[in-house]
Image (spheres, helix red, strand yellow):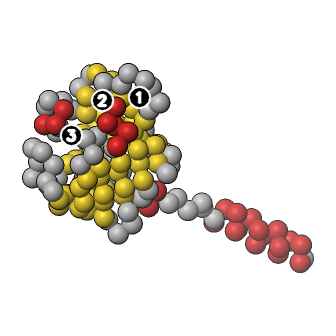
């Protein structure tokens, strides 16, 4: 009888236990650097490559901190601070950025694709004035 009770309790626990999935809003909190950058349809930077069209992308950092603070360093070394938020699991919004990035009102939005805990791809939803009005795609590695 004791063995049957232990077996039943074990079965109930196994059936009733579901692994907890950490929300993306927690998984995305880390420092991200560019491994590949495309401006329009042109690849302008690949990490570790020589002869990159825009070698300054080694400066590009996206520091998403818990509590919603962001520190964003663009390819030209300009550093912006502000807040970040996720809208669903596929849109990242950087807002209240100071100083205001060129051609924005302090907000930059990205579509997120191919997200894992170690990498993600961001596509800017509007053209970037600093890169000649191109819509840019960034493959990022997280640390």
Q: Which residue is mark 2?
A: 54
From the viewer's side, name the closer residue of 76 and 97: 76
Question: Mark 1 and mark 3: span between their CA atoms?
Answer: 21 Å
Where's residue 90, x and y in %? 33, 47
Which numbered mark, 1 or 3, is in the foreground of this view? Answer: 1
Answer few, some or many: residues within 10 Å of disc 1's Cα (few below 14, many 20 plus, some between 14 and 19).
many
Mark 1, residue position: 46
Q: Residue furthest bottom?
A: 2
Residue 120: quadrant of the picture? top left
In the foreground, 72 or 109: 72
Q: List x then y, in percent, for residue 21.
A: 52, 59
Horizontal and vertical percent for residue 136?
25, 33
Which circle, 2 or 1, is nearer the viewer?
Answer: 2
Q: Residue at x 9, y 52 (%)?
A: 105
The residue sitting at 41% across, 48% down in the picture is 32
Label 2, label 1: how many angstroms apart (C-alpha)?
9 Å
Using the image, tell me which numbered label, if any, was put on residue 125: 3
């Amino acid at each position: 009888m004791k063995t049957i009770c232990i077996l039943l309790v074990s079965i109930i626990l196994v059936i009733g236990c579901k692994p907890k999935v950490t929300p993306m809003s927690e998984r995305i909190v880390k420092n991200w650097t560019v491994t590949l950058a495309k401006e329009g349809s042109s690849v302008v930077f690949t990490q570790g490559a020589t002869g990159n069209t825009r070698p300054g992308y080694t400066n590009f950092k996206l520091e998403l901190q818990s509590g919603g603070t962001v520190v964003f360093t663009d390819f030209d070394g300009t550093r912006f601070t502000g807040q970040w938020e996720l809208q669903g699991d596929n849109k990242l919004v950087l807002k209240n950025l100071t100083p205001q990035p060129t051609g924005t009102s302090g907000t930059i939005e990205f579509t997120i694709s191919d997200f894992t805990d170690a990498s993600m791809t961001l596509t800017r939803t509007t053209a970037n004035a600093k890169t000649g009005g191109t819509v840019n795609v960034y493959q990022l590695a997280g640390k």
